[in-house]
Image (cartoon, helix red, strand yellow):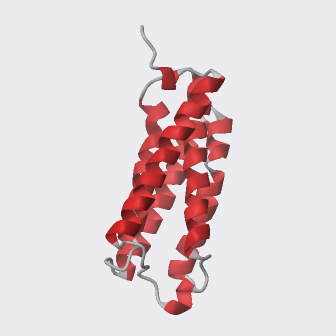
Amino acid sequence: MHTASRDRGDMPNLWVNIAALVGAVLIGNALIFSLGFDGGSLSPAKEAWLPPGPLVGMIWVVQFALMGAARWLYVRDARDHGWRGWLPVGLALICLAFPVYTSGLADPATGAIGTLVTLVATLAAMLTLGRRSSAAAWALVPLAIWGSYVACVYYLA
């Protein structure tokens, strides 16, 4: 059975998985800013609780790199090339949509619901991946923390 290069657990493929998802977020961010989705749907009082836009962009680049690493860690540890190995990629797709449903084009309720969906998807991915690779689950902890923080801004600030 042929295994795609990104599905092998060797070190060069760590970089393939990371580069694929970091490339996706960089392209996604370029589209977001070029199409004008960079304005938030939060009130100015709630916006004050978030870091400046460039820092948020860097946070997302790190998150996507960690999702790529989580995919690689899961494949390496679990030797699983089934659907579970693709959970970090699915999570990345959900996260790519994050700026769209939290932009100025969306209302605050859409942003709040989208933030909760992203957080729940992250926790579900962590639980599922953690059954066979605790390292893969731990790689997603910063995303869960960021999602929890943003959810608190939407709901509590």
Horizontal side of residue 109 vs 48, given as left or right: left
Q: Quadrant of the N terminus?
A: top left
Question: Can you say whether 58 is above or below 71 in the image?
Answer: below
Spot occupied by residue 93 in the image (x, y as percentages of width and height): 40, 50
Residue 132 at least partly seen = no
Q: Residue at x 62, y 76 (%)?
A: 51
Q: Quadrant of residue 34?
A: bottom left
Q: Quadrant of residue 106?
A: bottom left
Residue 103 at least partly seen = yes
Spot occupied by residue 28 in the image (x, y as percentages of width and height): 41, 56
- Along the viewing direction, whichever of 11 and 156 lies nearer the viewer: 11
Q: Residue at x 55, y 92 (%)?
A: 45
Spot occupied by residue 85 in the image (x, y as percentages of width and height): 49, 32
Question: Can you say whether 129 is above or below 39 in the image?
Answer: above
Q: Quadrant of the C terminus?
A: bottom right
Which residue extends farthest bottom?
45
Spot occupied by residue 32 in the image (x, y as percentages of width and height): 38, 65
- Along the viewing direction, whichever of 28 and 76 lies nearer the viewer: 28
